[in-house]
Amino acid sequence: MPKTGTTALQGFLRSNRNLLPESGLRYMEAGRRRLNGEGNLPISHNRIVFDLNKTPSSLAGFQEALAEEYEAHRHQACLVSSEMFFTADMERLAKVFSGIPAKEIRVVFYCRRYSDFFEADYKQRAKNGRITGGATKFVRDRLEQIERSPEGHNYSGRVEQIRMAFPEAAIEPQIYDRALLKNGNVIDDFFEKMGLEVPDGASTDMPANPSLSRVASEAFGIVTRAMGKRESRRLRRLSAKDPVMLRRHDVLESSERTWLDGYLAGTDDGFLREFFPDRKTLFEPPQLTEDELTFQRDTAGEVEALQKATEIVFRMALSFNVSGRGIAGRK
């Protein structure tokens, strides 16, 4: 699922593609490469999801390419990876993989604490310019939606959809918690869960992306709407050391976080018992600082923080433009 170290794992796989055969792993090219063979080889298999709702020939093309590559490398563990699979139309996705023997398919995904995913998802939407009504309206609307339809937001509902689409596949959810991951690292953990060894000479010490604050995400969202995603991404790569730009646990207030984690955990009791029978709870409560416990969104301090973050981002944009590397306009 999104926000569980997927990009770090995919980056490792692509960077070490020449070493993967010694581990018995094949990071499939089919589904990453364009059907016409043109262009660079992307980091992930997102292209499959992009094309799911296009012409039937696209699905047939991916189906054939995946089946052929799998047959040529079936003595290895063949991996297809995209965080977009988690929210894709499972029935259509299953058609793409229908050329691979159903009983040989394993569906592996990492589960993240509900409130942590909620906040990461909000920040992703915000920096992409998709939050226009303010954080509080988004949070309240989304929590009401979750209460009405928990099956669209819990893990039980998703597993049910996976089972319907891939009835013979092995479903293997894992917990995304750095305290539980091997070496605190999703790459090492994934290889261990797959029964594989990390290739000799390949470093799994990938730098973690710093967590942008909510107000920084919202400020970058203004740039995204005004100048386009490409320029916004370029700016985010610049180092912003001011504390207002980096912060965690600043989307949900404490009572909202407690309700969300408790409510969805209650709807996932069957999921917990089936896949993690030795655990008392799916996720441990988050360890919050005093400031995080007392955090409130709509305060004068938060308004001031947003103003400061916006000023920093706009100064970065001006500096970036003057330097000659250029912000040319919306893409």
Image (cartoon, rainbow, N blue to C red):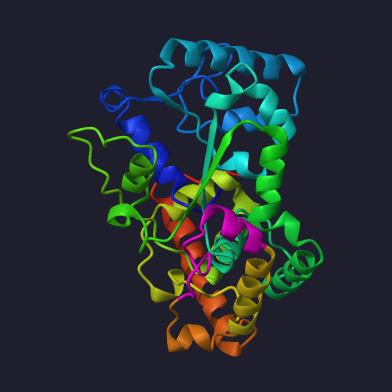
274 vs 167, left or right, is: left
As drawn, is 211 to the left or to the right of 126? Answer: left
Percent from the top left, x then y, of residue 198? 26, 37
Name above or below for residue 269 compared with residue 35.
Answer: below
Q: How many marks?
A: 0
Q: Is residue 328 visible?
A: no
Q: Position of residue 268 (x, y in %)?
A: 65, 62
> In this view of the protein, which residue sits in the foreground, 289 or 102?
102
Segment colored magenta: 268-286
Q: Nearer the viewer, residue 47 or 188?
A: 188
Name of the residue lying farthest toward the right: 148
Q: Is residue 160 visible?
A: yes
Q: Quadrant of residue 150?
A: bottom right
Residue 83 vs 103, above or below: the answer is: below
Residue 222 drawn at (x, y percent): 62, 60
Foreground of the two, 218 or 80: 80
Residue in the image at 37% along x and 60% along y:
180
Judge by depth and name the residue closer to the eye, 80 or 252.
Answer: 80
Q: Is residue 78 magenta?
A: no
Residue found at x 50% / y 71%? 309
Instruction: Name the image quarter holding the C terminus.
Output: top right
Question: Is 144 positioned to the left or the right of 78 in the image?
Answer: right
Q: Hey, which quadrant is residue 196 in on the image?
A: top left
Kindly report the secondary structure that dominates the magenta region of the rendered protein. loop
Outermost residue toward the left?
Answer: 201
